[in-house]
Image (cartoon, rainbow, N blue to C red):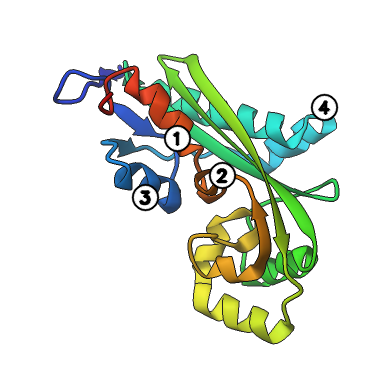
C-alpha cells in the first residue's frame, strides 16, 4: 500500500522519476527538496511504437515522461511526481542513448557538422492524474570537429556520455562540440526548470 508522502512543512513531497544525475542536480541547485525514484521502462520499444504511430519527437517525450511519472506515483500517494524525457531528432531520425562508447562515437560522427533538434518534456503526476506538462524544443548545431578531437572528448567525458541522447552534456565538455545553440539551457540539460518551478510554487514546494 503506498504511503501518503508529504514534506516537513506540509507541502506535498516531490519525487523525481528519473536516475538522471543532471536532472537531480538542476532541482537540488534550485533549492527543491525531493527524493529520486528511478523507474525502468523499455524506452526503445516505446519509441518504436510511437514512430509507427507517426508521433512527433515532442509527442514522444510527453508520452514517455508521463508514463514514468504515472508508474512511480503508485508508490507515493499524494506526492508530486516529476517525469521527464528527451528525444533527439536529426533529419527525421531519432537517436537514443548510446549503449557503449563505440555507439557514442558513431552517433557523434553522425551529428558532426549538422543541426539537430532536442525535444525535452517534463510533467507532474499525483496519484495517477496528470497535473502539468511542458515541452521545449531546442536547435543545436555541432561543429565539424576532427576525429582527434572526438578521441580527446570521449576520453575526457568517459562513460557519462552513455546517459545522454546524442552522447553529450552541454554543461560539461560537450559544450566544445557545438558552434551554435538555440533554446533553453535548462531544457537542454534535462528539465524545463523555470516553468516547472512556476508550477511547484503553486503547491508551496518552493517559495512565492
Sooner in the amino-acid sequence: mark 4 or mark 2: 4
In terms of depth relative to the viewer, which is nearer, 120 or 17? 120
**Which label number is shown at residue 194?**
1
Q: Position of residue 117 (x, y in %)?
A: 72, 47
What residue is at 61 percent from the left and 31 percent from the top? Answer: 135
Sooner in the amino-acid sequence: mark 4 or mark 1: 4
**Which label number is shown at residue 25?**
3
Few, some or many residues within 10 Å of mark 2 (<14, 14–19, 20+): some
| Residue 195 located left or right of residue 146 | left
Q: Position of residue 152 (x, y in %)?
A: 59, 83
Q: CA distance from mark 3 to mark 1?
A: 14 Å
Q: Position of residue 199 (x, y in %)?
A: 41, 23
| Residue 153 located left or right of residue 199 | right
Q: CA distance from mark 4 to mark 1?
A: 31 Å
Q: Quadrant of the C terminus?
A: top left
Few, some or many residues within 10 Å of mark 1 (<14, 14–19, 20+): few
Which mark is nearer the camera, 3 or 1? 1
Q: Are marks 2 and 1 in contact (CB under 8 Å)?
A: yes
Which mark is nearer the camera, 4 or 1? 1
Few, some or many residues within 10 Å of mark 3 (<14, 14–19, 20+): few
| Residue 13 located left or right of residue 127 | left
**Mark 2 — residue?**
184
Q: Write down the quadrant of residue 143 in the picture.
A: bottom right
Sooner in the amino-acid sequence: mark 3 or mark 4: 3
Query: Tag 4's secondary structure?
Result: loop
Amino acid at each position: 500500500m503506498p504511503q501518503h508522502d508529504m514534506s516537513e512543512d506540509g507541502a506535498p513531497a516531490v519525487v523525481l522519476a528519473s536516475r538522471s544525475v543532471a536532472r537531480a542536480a538542476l532541482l537540488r541547485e534550485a533549492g527543491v527538496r525531493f527524493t529520486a525514484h528511478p523507474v525502468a521502462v523499455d524506452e526503445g520499444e516505446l519509441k518504436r511504437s510511437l514512430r509507427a504511430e507517426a508521433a512527433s519527437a515532442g509527442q514522444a517525450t510527453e508520452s514517455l515522461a508521463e508514463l514514468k511519472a504515472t508508474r512511480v506515483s503508485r508508490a507515493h500517494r499524494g506526492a508530486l511526481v516529476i517525469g521527464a524525457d528527451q528525444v533527439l531528432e536529426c533529419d527525421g531520425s531519432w537517436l537514443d542513448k548510446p549503449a557503449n562508447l563505440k555507439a557514442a562515437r558513431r552517433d557523434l560522427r553522425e551529428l558532426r557538422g549538422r543541426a539537430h533538434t532536442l525535444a525535452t518534456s517534463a510533467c507532474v503526476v499525483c496519484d495517477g492524474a496528470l497535473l502539468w506538462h511542458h515541452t521545449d524544443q531546442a536547435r543545436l548545431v555541432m561543429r565539424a570537429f576532427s576525429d582527434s578531437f572526438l578521441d580527446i572528448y570521449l576520453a575526457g567525458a568517459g562513460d557519462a556520455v552513455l546517459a545522454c541522447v546524442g552522447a553529450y552534456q552541454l554543461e560539461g565538455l560537450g559544450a566544445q562540440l557545438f558552434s551554435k545553440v538555440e533554446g533553453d539551457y535548462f531544457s537542454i540539460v534535462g528539465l524545463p526548470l523555470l516553468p516547472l518551478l512556476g508550477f511547484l510554487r503553486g503547491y508551496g514546494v518552493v517559495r512565492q
